[in-house]
Image: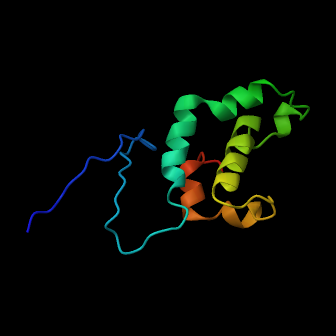
Amino acid sequence: MTQSTCSTPRLSPLNGKPVLLGFDGADMSSDAGLTLLREIERRAGLAQRLADCLHDPRDPAKVQHSLCDIIRFRIMMIAAGYEDGNDATALRHDPSFRRVMPESW
């Protein structure tokens, strides 16, 4: 029996560690596709480009999350099917979402 292999896309390291995609694991997340989407977003710079178009009236001394990170999180939520935004508090603890967001989340 021949085992087929295919190459997986190269992803940017996360905290200095390589990120690998695999489809042979026992435990999988329905939101694992966010890892690939995050890579596409990072390369396209969509969240940063949107943030650059908006004025952020918040006091910088009191800002915990940048406007770019908030937009990125919202993009990921919509892509994962959480279009209402009312799941944000729960999703910030979700492993798939934590993997694609900065450590400050």
Horizontal and vertical percent for residue 99? 53, 53
Furthest-right residue in this view: 57
67 to 84, vertically: above or below: above
Horizontal and vertical percent for residue 96? 55, 60
- Name the residue nearer the viewer: 28 or 6: 6
Q: Is residue 66 left or right of residue 105?
A: right
Q: Is residue 104 left or right of residue 59?
A: left
9 to 54, vertically: above or below: below
Horizontal and vertical percent for residue 43? 52, 31
Q: Is residue 15 left or right of residue 58?
A: left
Horizontal and vertical percent for residue 9? 36, 43
Residue positioned 83% across, 28% down in the render: 54
Q: Quadrant of residue 42?
A: top right
- Name the residue nearer the viewer: 98 or 47: 47
Q: Quadrant of residue 86?
A: bottom right
Residue positioned 42% across, 38% down in the render: 12
Furthest-left residue in this view: 1
Q: Is residue 12 left or right of residue 96?
A: left
Task: Count the labels in the image.
Answer: 0
Residue positioned 50% across, 51% down in the render: 35
- Name the residue nearer the viewer: 100 or 9: 9
41 to 1, vertically: above or below: above
12 to 26, vertically: above or below: above
